[in-house]
Image (cartoon, rainbow, N blue to C red):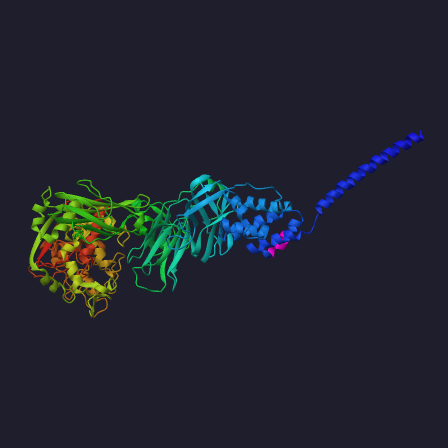
Amino acid sequence: MGDKLRKVYIILAAVTGLIGLIVILIVGGTLLRVDRSSDLPQSAKDTMYRASVLTGTEETLPVWQREIEQGHLSVADYVENQFTAHPYLLSGKDDSAFASDLACVAYNDAFQTDKINGMLEGGSRRYVIEKILSEVDLSYMPVNGFSDPVGTQCGEVEIKSPLENEEGYAFGIRKIEGNMQVKGNEMRTDFFVDQSLRPGQIHVPQTSGQVDFTMEWDTLGEIPGNHDVVILLRTSDGRGNVLTGGKVNIPDFKAIENDSVVPSSIRLGDQEAWYSLDAKDRDAYVNLVEASSDVAVTLYDRYGDTIGKNDLPNSEFETLRAKKQETDPDKTAEGNDGTADNAFFVRVRRSENAAPSVAEISYVLVSSKEVGKTDETGYLAIVSEEGVVPTPRPTGAVSDAEKERIVSCRDEGGNTVEMTRASITFLPLNAYLTELSFLDEKKEPLPIYPEFDMNTFDYSLVGDSFSSVGLEYTAVEGYAAKILMTNASNMLSPGAVGDTVAIQQGENKLSVQVSSLDGTSRTYTLHLLNGQDSGGFRKNTLSKFPASYADGLWLLHSLHPNYRFEAYQTGLTFDEVLDNEDHVDRSLISSSYNPEWVKPGSPVYDGKSWKAARQEVVAYFLDPRNFLTPDGVFQFEKLSFDETAHTPEGISAMVKNSFMDEADPDYVSILLKAGKESGVSPYFLTSRILQEMGRNGESKLCHGTLSGYEGYFNFYNIGSTPNPSVKDGALINGAKYAKYGSKPEEKKITPDEEALLLPWTTPEKAICGGALWIAKSYIEIGQNTLYFQKFDILDNEDGMYKHQYAQNIAMASNEGTRYYTAYASQDMLDGSFVFIIPVYEQMPQEYGLSL
């Protein structure tokens, strides 16, 4: 029993010992493998050293040697890494030079290249390195085996677009496009900025043959300034192509946002300023307003390529517009930490049209489609969609609801502001022209009437021998605007600027439609009469006027066929009348209104600023041909009461936001009553009061508060003759008339003056009585237009030039414009108005021009 147990124990001990020995051997072997660290043979070190010298990487050689000694890499792996890394590839060595370098490394003989060159034909550099070195010493074999003998290979490469844009700048996502001969799709691009690596992207639509490619470099985050940039195309066969590079300039951008108002400038000594805008999901709108000097602007897309340039000569504003940029849905879904999908870039530079200067140029950038302005807020970015915004001159009725509609805006501080539409002045930025010329057959500008102005949309021309008309223009939006000219008579349109449209006999209506980026449009129209019209207007009306009146009268007839025009033959020469009107204090202008209109050396004749007007200013307002426009002609309106034309609503529109916009006293009812009783247009009476008292009722005579004459009113300034030697001399004389009549020194009102409701102790008496005085003193003796009341050219019992209602040279023009606005507000501009227009002999050659 004991012997048997002893044998069992002996067997178990032997087995256990054997197992222990096996474990020790396994662990020991593992430890030996883990700790295996043997010095490299000198031949391997020499091989690696030669590679490091050729690639300029001697400093890192010890690190690589340790990796190889520890078995992590091989000599072939090291050499392959050095010869396919960007420092070596950027040297641009071809296969022949590479073969010489590899021979030097492998054989220590740079001329032993025959075999290497043979393998390189159609083969991968990586594979050749691995194969050649493995043949030199099997221990040099790559740790992870041999690579593809061929790999992706790239042949000749042609670059079609440079790294920088056409102006030498690089910003946004720069796209370099070209084509190349390629086999395979394993490739990448590296961008080196001042020798620092930046990731790039390459897009190749197919994997073999002659293919187009696009490479992208996102410059976001690069330091502004000049940089050296190199682009390296690397393929999996171990080769690299230096495609393009050089010096590029990255601008310094200031970010702006949608719906922002940003004061900015081109700084002293600088030539330009740059801005970036992420328009998010919208079209891009950037407006530069109130420029202190002439500037030019350029808009670029997210790739730094030009969308368009604008440079309006001598303009206080410039505009840039662009549609929302299309994006790749796949890229958008992946997310984008670089340049935004809808990023735009703006360049503002000193205009080439401006005089050379290094002075600062200030301006305000407003990044919204429409820009508004008020005295209280300054410039406003219009946030809400407003469609076609109002023009400075109304062309039709505008409802109170439309005027009071709330517009959402943002001010300079980024605050949201809500204002009524009527309280905002909209800048003329979208669908406007700044220049417009119609050309004859010789490409010479035609003398259209009136002189072009961006806010005037209708023009006219009368002649007899037109066959075709061409077009030249400049749009506020420049490149972003679309222009189409048509003739309503034959519907022909030019394809481009400089083309012409055919003109037929009779009436022609040439329309120039200006369309904005979003389709908003306005139309400028030339009403051209070539010969006789079908309605006989030229024969029956124009023939009664000098030829120089024809363009303006044809314009008015084309727009409002119901208007009737009567020629008043004065029998006077223009210069004769001008000499008499340019006399002492007959024609005054406020120096605060326009100092340049004041005659040099003139004393103050009334108030604090009313001085004699320059002769050329008097001539301008005297010449009726300067006012044959839709809003200018109403100074010639026959001022008789017309119950169908003169309504409470029309009066309300005229007094709105004035001191007469009150219910107590009810000025609207009083004015309508005054018009009926006197037979005078209540619009004329309303305008005259606003002219004399001021829109805010600045004169004490409309409140009955003049010291010493409290309770006496004089709304028309009747009898308010100037007396510069006495403070408030004109007001005192007007108050004396309201209290005592025409002979205040007698302090007695005559029966005739009682018929004029004197004394004027209430607003109603003063308004109605003054209307009776106007009718008796002016209307009934032939001064039945605003023009005749300002310029007394009627040879009646008191002679000429003496019985003039106002000294303000612009009185007739200003009040006529008020009439126009009142009629437009009530949609009554197409009424049957009668206009009496003076005709002088020997009239000036020039007319219809801006003063």
Q: Main secondary structure of the magenta part?
A: helix
**Residue lying at 7% horizontally and 50% vertically, measured from the top left:** 544
Between 295 and 570, the residue placed more toward the observer is 295
Find residue 458 and report its horizontal and vertical position in percent.
20, 48
Q: Is residue 70 left or right of residue 317?
A: right
Say if 816 sits above or below 203 in the image: below
Between 519 and 680, the residue placed more toward the observer is 519
Between 833 and 606, the residue placed more toward the observer is 833
Find residue 365 and report its horizontal and vertical position in percent.
37, 55
Is any atom of residue 568 visible in this view?
yes
Q: Is residue 365 left or right of residue 217?
A: left
Find residue 481 and report its horizontal and vertical position in percent.
30, 47
* Corner quadrant of residue 1: top right
> Which residue occupies the extreme right position in the image?
2
What is the number of callouts on the image?
A: 0
Q: Is 277 covered by the magenta stretch?
A: no
Q: Is residue 77 left or right of residue 391?
A: right
Q: Which quarter shows the C terminus? A: bottom left
**Residue lying at 60% horizontally and 41% vertically, measured from the top left:** 145
Magenta-highlighted residues? 59-64
Q: Is residue 376 left or right of residue 332?
A: left
Say if 667 sits above or below 579 in the image: above
**Residue lying at 52% horizontally and 44% vertically, measured from the top left:** 118
Find residue 499 and report its horizontal and vertical position in percent.
21, 46
Say if 353 sits above or below 499 in the image: below
Is any atom of residue 643 visible in this view?
no
> Which residue occupies the extreme top position in the image?
1
